[in-house]
Each structure stands twice: as structure tokens, then as C-alpha cells.
Image (cartoon, rainbow, N blue to C red):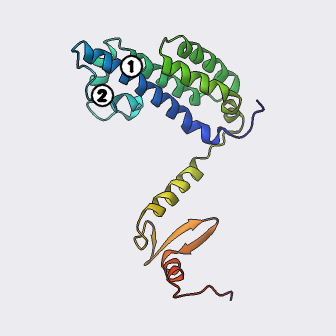
Amino acid sequence: MKPSLLPLAILANLMKYMNEAVDEVRKAEHRALLAEGNRILVGTKYLWLYAQENLPEGFGEWLAALRGLHLKTGRAWAIKESLRDLWDYQRRGWAERHWQAWYFWATHSRLPPVIEAAKTLQRHLPNILTYFEHRITNAASEGLNSMIETLKKTPMGSAIGVIGRWPFIFTWGALISIRLFQRLRRGGATLRAN
């Protein structure tokens, strides 16, 4: 596969794949433990999806206690957290070394969802490693896209962003007044070139 500047979208998707794998491991382990009458994983779904530094206050002890039980879910979570360390590297060579160690750990974890996620990410490795040469992400465009999608889901007339009294949205490089758009849709106004 020829490397491209596609790590743009892959950065966020890497963790999405791993979060889904951790959740699948948790579900399977939770079902198995419930069948034995053990309710230790009840209410922990979102706990395992947090990044270490984003844990809400008081959840750290809970997570540490669960990880101390040597659950499969704890192992999957540790593998996910190790993948996050990849972005701390400044050089491609060191990032590749980290990837190789991480990939070996993930594929030898005996956790099918984690193995599947690792193999999926391995197929995109050239694009992932391109990030270390260019340091380009699409975070800004993803954020803008999210704002546009949110605006599209809100009823017309409610303002997401307000400049003075007039709400505006940013689309395709032009600022369009929502109120003007509403009048155009009703047929009450026309666009004229000055």
C-alpha cells in the first residue's frame, strides 16, 4: 500500500477500533461472569472506554481494583492505552518500534476482538506512520464538520453560533445567514449580485 496523507482520519479511528474491541471483550467476559453468578463487571461499560488521564474523579481506584483482578477486559484496556502512547513519539523509527511491540502484544493477547482490531490497524500502518513525517491531522476539519452536522440537526431558526443578533453557519467557504436562508426557502427573498 502506498502511503498517503490519510492519517488525517485514521488518528481518531485507531482509538475507535480499540474502544470497540475493549467493549466486545467486556461484553463477552461480563456474560461469562454473570453465568457464574459474578457481577463484578456490572456498570463498568464506560469505565473501560476512558483514557487513563480522563478518568472522572474517584473512578481511578475502581479501575485499579478491577485491573488488579486480572480480567480479560483489563488486559484489553491496557493494550488500548499502550496504543495511545504511539502518538507521543517524535520520530517515525521510534514509532515503528513501539508499533511492532504493541502489535505483537495485541496479536498474542488471545482476545479475538483485540486481535481483529490490531490486524485492521496493521493494514493501515503505512498511512499511520505518515503522521510522523508530516504531523498533519484533520482535527480542525472534523470539528467543523461536527458543528455543521449539529447545526443540520437543530430546528431552523435556533442559533448555534451568534454574531451580534445574526446566527451564521460556515459552509463551503462562505458565511450564510440562517435567516436569509429561511427567507429564501419560503420564497420571501432572492439573491442579487451587487
Q: Which mark is residue 73?
A: 1
Say which residue appears at 57% left-offset and 18% top-offset: 102
Question: Which quadrant does the C terminus fall into?
Answer: bottom right
Identified by mark 2, the residue type is Thr
Say which residue appears at 61% left-offset and 41% top-offset: 9
Q: Which residue is mark 2?
A: 44
Residue 30 visible in the snapshot: yes
Circle 2 residues within 10 Å: few <14, some 14–19, many ≥20: some
Circle 1 residues within 10 Å: few <14, some 14–19, many ≥20: many
Residue 112 pos. (x, y %): 49, 17
Question: Is 100 in front, or is 28?
Answer: 28
Q: Are marks 2 and 1 in contact (CB under 8 Å)?
A: yes
Q: Total number of numbered labels?
A: 2
Q: Residue furthest front?
A: 35
Is 8 placed left or right of 108 in the picture? Answer: right
Say which residue appears at 55% left-offset and 22% top-offset: 116
Is 110 placed left or right of 134 in the picture? Answer: left
Alpha carbons under labels 2 and 1: distance apart: 10 Å
